[in-house]
């Protein structure tokens, strides 16, 4: 059943009670993006250790179950990781992380958090 | 709300459905329920055949050729213009300009009429329920000219606040243009455009050149109800073919002849000129002055066939069918717990468009995209999102909404399938 793939119970549980949701007062890296298609909004903030390791990553925003659960899982997955390895994350990694294969019209929801992450990484290189 | 079931149906939906090949498709193993008609309608085989027949039998470029095929293509193209003019009772068919869609028709007005007539300090009056297509072109025009945009607000019930006294607040001596949607693509509200235009004209100078011009966006009206442009009496009226059984790529601008005569061209090039010299050219007669380049001949012919098809059903019957279906759906949806419907509750005041959300504790409990994905697994096509009306979403204080919209081939049985699908979505989201 497709809906079981798209709306796995574990994913919905994360949507209802997301981990890593909140705001960091003085983040080292930060970005926010809106998916113009549906208005999904994800902000990602990152606190670094020694300028190269993710000490803490929190997301905030609102939108559909897919976009919000994906952001929660992504924030969780990069904790303690080196920026050099975080930088290598690609779309397939996110789909594996959330464990679903969305239809073409919903893939943007799933990958919004990855786009935000890449923007956040760029925000560091500017400062 | 009472739903009449004993009277003779307005439309023979069994017969109509046989004309639409796509309706026999299955989606995710379930028969398709197509409830996304406000986005685009499906096409009957009569329209598809008219387009094929043009390409198979009459294809040639229009207007310039003296050979037989070119004469046939020109006759079919201009014949389509006449059919479209008659369909909306536009009077003189030279007042019908073919465009790509309603958006292009509005852009044409903003460019050709607006840039000539709107000056710094002038006001353009819109409403809070406009589609982006009847907002963004005016934003650009206002930015370029220094004109100001004003908005007629909507009431709690999703209707315009345009009683005479309130209208006085908005229509001032600086108002040069009023642009209003005929039927809202989100709320379904049918705006009293004729009465509004009468009030605006009454309040303004009788001098045609000086009084504000009124543009009506009829994209959601012309496909669904009898529309007589001469009766409504706007200066500009726009609509599109693909929402009324026609192909994509063909839209319509109606404008009063004297305005079209006075307006400068929109796009320029071939077919829109009378004489071309090295340094200057003179413009073709209306409407061709506004149709530069080879037009969408097949599209126009397809739209003409769509008008024929709708005429054969009768637009009054189309409206009655949708009104009955909307009343039925509103009643059924009211039984779904936590479901909030936006827009007027009275089916007399709304078209066949219903936007809604599942709301709990004042929060949208299932994001419309999630709802639409789950309905899709049941073969039900609905739209979700901001419906190209982001400012209106802000007024309604919601991020987005789900929307069902009906047409001639939809049935009560299909509405019945919607309800368990919604319950399924609520089960998945544990509501």
Image (spheres, coloured by chain):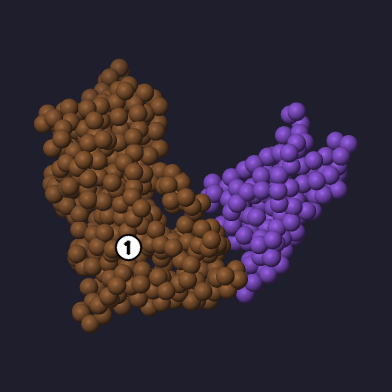
- Residue B66 sits in which quadrant? top left
At x 28%, y 46%, the residue is: B161
Badge 1: how crowded within 10 Å, few (<14), some, or many (20+)?
many
Q: Looking at the image, which is closer to me, A112 or B362?
A: B362
In this rendering, does residue A51 appear at all?
yes
Image quadrant where one finds the C terminus of chain B? bottom right
Q: What element carries label 1?
A: loop
What residue did someone put label 1 on? B345
The colour one sees for chain B in the rendered image is: brown
Quarter occupied by residue B417? bottom left
Q: What is the x, y in percent for residue B207?
A: 12, 29
Q: In this view, does B257 lie to the left or right of A44?
A: left
The residue positioned 60% from the left and 48% from the top of the image is: A41
Chain in purple in the render:
A
Q: Which residue is rendered at x = 48% and y = 76% of the image?
A: B420
Q: Which quadrant of the rendered structure holds the N terminus of chain B? A: bottom left
- Report the residue at 36% width, 23% height from top: B146
């Amino acid at each position: 059943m497709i809906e079981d793939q798209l709306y796995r119970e574990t994913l919905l549980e994360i949507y209802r009670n997301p981990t890593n949701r909140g705001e960091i007062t003085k983040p080292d890296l930060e970005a926010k993006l809106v998916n113009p298609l549906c208005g999904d909004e994800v902000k990602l903030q990152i606190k670094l250790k020694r300028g190269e390791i993710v000490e803490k990553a929190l997301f905030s925003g609102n939108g559909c179950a897919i976009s919000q659960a994906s952001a929660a899982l992504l924030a969780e997955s990069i904790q303690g990781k080196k920026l050099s390895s975080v930088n290598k994350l690609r779309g397939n990694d996110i789909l594996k992380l959330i464990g679903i294969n969305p239809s073409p019209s919903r893939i943007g929801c799933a990958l919004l958090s990855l786009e935000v992450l890449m923007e956040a990484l760029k925000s560091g290189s500017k400062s | 709300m009472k739903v009449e079931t004993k009277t003779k149906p307005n439309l023979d939906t069994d017969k109509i459905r046989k004309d639409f090949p796509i309706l026999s498709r299955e989606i995710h193993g379930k028969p398709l329920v197509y409830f996304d008609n406000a986005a685009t309608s499906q096409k009957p085989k009569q329209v598809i055949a008219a387009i094929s027949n043009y390409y198979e039998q009459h294809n040639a470029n229009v207007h310039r050729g003296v050979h037989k095929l070119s004469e046939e293509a020109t006759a079919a193209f201009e014949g389509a213009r006449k059919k479209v003019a008659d369909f909306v009772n536009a009077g003189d068919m030279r007042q019908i300009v073919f465009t790509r869609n309603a958006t292009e028709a509005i852009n044409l007005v903003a460019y050709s009429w607006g840039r000539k007539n709107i000056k710094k300090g002038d006001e353009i009056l819109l409403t809070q329920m406009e589609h982006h297509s009847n907002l963004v072109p005016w934003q650009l025009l206002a930015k370029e000219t220094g004109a100001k945009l004003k908005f007629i607000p909507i009431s709690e019930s999703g209707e315009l606040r345009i009683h005479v006294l309130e209208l006085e607040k908005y229509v001032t001596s600086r108002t040069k243009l009023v642009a209003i949607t005929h039927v809202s693509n989100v709320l379904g509200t049918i705006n009293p455009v004729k009465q509004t235009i009468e009030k605006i004209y009454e309040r303004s100078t009788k001098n045609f050149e000086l009084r504000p011009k009124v543009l009506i966006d009829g994209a959601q009206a012309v496909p669904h109800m009898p529309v007589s442009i001469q009766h409504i009496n706007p200066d500009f009226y726009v609509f599109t073919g693909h929402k009324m059984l026609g192909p994509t790529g063909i839209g319509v601008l109606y404008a009063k002849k004297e305005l079209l005569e006075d307006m400068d061209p929109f796009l320029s090039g071939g077919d829109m000129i009378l004489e071309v010299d090295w340094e200057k050219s003179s413009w073709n007669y209306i409407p061709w002055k506004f149709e530069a380049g080879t037009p969408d001949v097949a599209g126009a012919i397809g739209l003409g066939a769509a008008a024929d098809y709708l005429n054969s059903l009768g637009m009054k019957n189309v409206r009655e069918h949708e009104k009955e279906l909307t009343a039925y759906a509103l009643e059924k949806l009211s039984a779904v717990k936590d479901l909030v419907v936006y827009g007027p509750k009275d089916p007399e005041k709304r078209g066949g468009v219903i936007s809604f959300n599942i709301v709990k504790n004042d929060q949208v409990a299932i994001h419309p995209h999630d709802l639409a994905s789950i309905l899709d697994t049941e073969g039900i096509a609905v739209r979700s999102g901001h419906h190209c009306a982001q400012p209106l979403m802000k007024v309604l204080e919601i991020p987005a909404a789900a929307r069902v919209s009906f047409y001639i081939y939809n049935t009560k049985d299909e509405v019945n399938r919607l309800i368990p699908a919604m319950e399924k979505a609520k089960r998945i989201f544990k509501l």
